[in-house]
Image (spheres, rainbow, N blue to C red):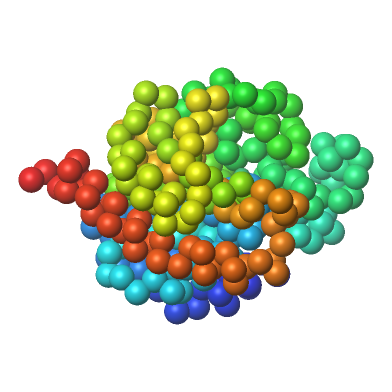
Amino acid sequence: MLIDDIMRLGSGAGETVYFAKSLYGYPLMLLRKGKPNGGGVLVVGAVHAREHITAKLLSLLMAEYSGDYPIDVVPALNPDGVILSTEGIEAFSLKKSERLKLLRINDGSGDFSLWKANLRGVDINVNFDAGWGTGDGNLRRPAPANYIGAYPGSEPETMAAVSLMNSGRYALVVAYHSKGEEVYWGFGEYAEYRKEAEAVARALGYKLKRTPHSAGGLKDYWIARHNLPGLTVEVGEECFPHPYPESRLTELGKKHSGIFEIYAEIAKKVWKDKLSGT
Ligand SMILES: [Zn+2]
């Protein structure tokens, strides 16, 4: 099961903190290294269900990180979706009506491997209060992807991330998705720390891009609310299918090796520039 896998991969990855619960009731877990000082890094994976490779990648990278600058990692913000995508609907004990509803949302199919949303068909990454409902491809009914939810922050997973982001612990937030080998930076008018975003893209060999037509995402909320830099990293070569194959995890880990040290350097700079008050 995924939660066990993450614990195994993340062993030696610092303190484990359970900070909230998913819609179904799974614990939302955070791996913490370093003492949070108000200028730390928050890295979030598996916002989208089928992108569960990011949960494993982040656990590996956290186990490897040996710096002393504070980093918090949420390997999977959407554990319900990940379990649905990897193990199917039978992994949940649901009322008959809930089960039928999920199957209906999935066009009658019992194959949930390409699902992106949470357990009631809300796409967490368009549910944040940042230009909510104005993004390209937004849907207004439950779906495997792109449904914005009844209102901004309607989902427990979204609000769990919001409370972390508003905790005053962080200077930089990075969200992990798959795939395409791209680093997205900025939101709306916000365009600071371009050089730092470039450095991340360069270190990974990824393309740096902006997302003019996206809204309601995790990094969008972080930037809009705090006026601090946020990134979305899309891991994995475009030529592979969804879900990105697990057999590529070691390769992916090698490619990302040392990237947490770069995030720490950027956060340190942002802390000095904007937050330390000196
Ligand atoms: Zn995604």
The location of residue 106, given as percent across then percent down, is 84, 40
Q: Nearer the viewer, residue 153 or 212?
A: 212
Q: Residue at x 17, y 43 (%)?
A: 273
Q: Residue at x 31, y 42 (%)?
A: 195
Q: Residue at x 81, y 50 (%)?
A: 112
Q: Nearer the viewer, residue 74 or 260?
A: 260
Residue 18 higher or lower than 202, as above or below: below
Residue reaching furthest to the right:
108
Which quadrant holds the N terminus? bottom right
Residue 214 higher or lower than 67, as above or below: above
Using residue 247 as the reference point, say whether residue 61 is left or right of it.
left
The location of residue 194, given as percent across then percent down, is 33, 38
Q: Residue at x 77, y 48 (%)?
A: 114
The location of residue 254, given as percent across then percent down, is 52, 69
Point out the quarter of the image occupied by ligand 1. Answer: top right
Quadrant in the rendering for residue 251: bottom right
Residue reaching furthest to the left:
278
Using residue 26 as the reference point, say whether residue 265 is left or right of it.
left
